Amino acid sequence: MKQKVVLATGNQGKVKEMSDVLSDLGFEVIAQTDLNIESPEETGLTFVENALLKARYASKMSGLPAIADDSGLVVNALGGAPGLYSARYAGVDGAAADAKNREKLLIELKDIPQAARQAKFVSCIVMLQHETDPSPIIAEGECFGEIAFAEKGQNGFGYDSLFFSPEVNCTFAELETVEKKKISHRARALSVLKSKLANKGA
């Protein structure tokens, strides 16, 4: 019998990406949106802190173990921006946010030469057994690349169409989903999570 776990996100891209892996680990994944749970205000100063905030709130509201991910794009030339504010970089919420965020990023980097457009995607995933779990499982993953001068590709979400990965010689949005799952920051964090859960005998 699979263990129920609430996934502390309303982002359907994340739900799809994470559910497949977590299902293979023996979890029945329930998105917090299916339980009418809103996300709390993200007041942390790091990806880890924000992930913990979201997981604790989802666990408190659902009474279930919770898994939360906080992730973002870190661009060296912008002092680490958009960073923690990646999802709301342009100050817009909802369906229009991704396009507005990419548009703002391109404007901010318009005078930056290719050699100085290094960036990384960061994902931090935490798992709590209950709201006050003092020993959360923390798994982090990163992938490195650079910001392209124009969008390329139709797959993915967020900044994928601007994130060029030298590892695969294309943007994340040009990859098939199955290929992206092998190398993305979230895939790497999930791999660490999987390993840590196995070591705990979960």
Image (tube, rainbow, N blue to C red):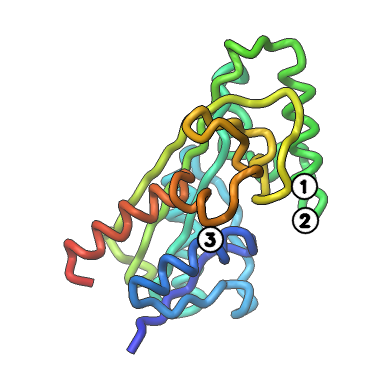
Residue at mark 3: 17
Residue at mark 1: 97
Give the structural element (helix, strand or loop) at label 3: helix
Quarter of the image with the N terminus in it: bottom left
Which residue is farthest bottom? 1
Residue 72 picture quarter = top right
Residue at mark 2: 94
Identify residue type, mark 1. Answer: Ala
Q: Nearer the viewer, residue 22 or 108?
A: 22
Where's residue 6, x and y in %? Answer: 48, 73
- Dot 3 or dot 2: first in sequence order is 3
Identify residue type, mark 2. Answer: Gly
Identify residue type, mark 3. Answer: Glu
Give the structural element (helix, strand or loop) at label 2: helix
Q: Residues within 10 Å of mark 2 (few under 14, many from 20)?
A: few
Query: Rounded to the nearest whole Å, what is the CA distance between mark 3 and mark 2?
Result: 19 Å
* Number of residue marks: 3
Q: Nearer the viewer, residue 51 or 176?
A: 176
